[in-house]
Amino acid sequence: YAIFARHILGLVPLEPLGAEPDARARGSMIHRALYRFARAHPGALPEDRAEIVAMLMRLADEELERLGAHPRIAAFWRPRFRRFAAWFAETEPARRAEVVRSLGEVAGRLEIAAPAGPFVLTARADRIDVLGSGALAIYDYKTGALPKDEEVVSGSAKQLPLEAAIAVAGGFEGIAVAPVAHLGYIRAHGGEPAGEERAITKSDPMALAEEAKRGLAALIARFDDPSTPYAALRRSGFEDEYRYDTYAQLARVDEWLNSNAVIS
């Protein structure tokens, strides 16, 4: 239903008045700081790790300033980001060992043939590393819990495999057609541990890319059929997740969940 409301009806929710910076704002700050760092150092890193930390903190402060320097930021977010920056400075040289070029916030698109006409998948990859072998490593920056390998392989966490499908087709700006050798997550937590890196190891990235593309094509074909409904509940066994669904009110989810009505 959220797809119907946003993309067909064109309804976009307004931010609440006087809202404090939330997890989304924190995630945006971290993503922007890491993107700007990669843009400044696409190849070789500064040898002094303290210099890496100092630069990340400066970039983070500039991004935080855009959020209005709310007291909560100074009290909680900044110290946690400093701990993550120290972890990043310690671990990034190993990630860059075989990297020729590291790119952040890379826009990509992939056109998929569908019954009702071409469907265009768009994405913005947090990070793509071009390796010396010519292959690619794709990372997703996370501030929350990392998806398990099983979720990625089963298709319930589709982002990285779909980005791999775009990369294999040469759909990312400034990056030539190349195989994908590595998919992984980098978590910016700031607690204990301050950061975490996890590679997807239970399936080959190229196989995941192909399966993700095939599954998306099947889903598009299903919804290209006018008889396919936009259901109010995506997965009726996961009612709790609808507390965070922006469009649940319009779909009248609470009304249906609190009745004996059968939802199809």
Image (tube, grey):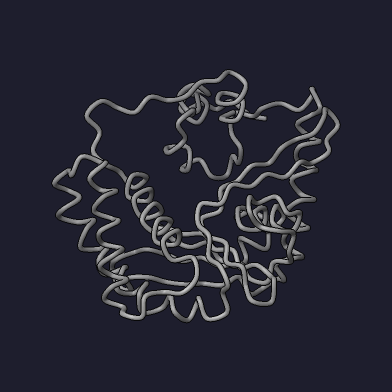
In the rendered image, which quarter contains the N terminus? Answer: top right
Q: Nearer the viewer, residue 35 or 207?
A: 35
Q: Nearer the viewer, residue 232 or 210?
A: 210
Is 143 located above or below residue 190 in the figure? above
Is 125 located above or below residue 199 in the figure? above
Q: Position of residue 191 (x, y in %)?
A: 28, 68
Q: Quadrant of residue 234?
A: top right
Judge left or right: residue 80 versus residue 215. left
Query: Who's the residue at 81% across and 36% down the image?
Result: 221
Judge left or right: residue 255 versus residue 46. right
Q: Position of residue 65 (x, y in %)?
A: 22, 45
Q: Quadrant of residue 264?
A: top right
Q: Nearer the viewer, residue 177 or 20?
A: 177
Q: Nearer the viewer, residue 175 or 115?
A: 175
Judge left or right: residue 16 versus residue 230. left
Query: Who's the residue at 72% across and 62% down the image?
Result: 208
Give the farthest residue toward the top.
9
Q: Position of residue 212 (x, y in %)?
A: 73, 54
Query: Who's the residue at 68% across and 71% down the image?
Result: 181
Give the farthest residue toward the right.
115
Query: Who's the residue at 50% across and 40% down the image?
Result: 239
Q: Quadrant of residue 222?
A: top right
Q: Position of residue 29 (x, y in %)?
A: 34, 50
Is 60 located above or below residue 9 in the figure? below
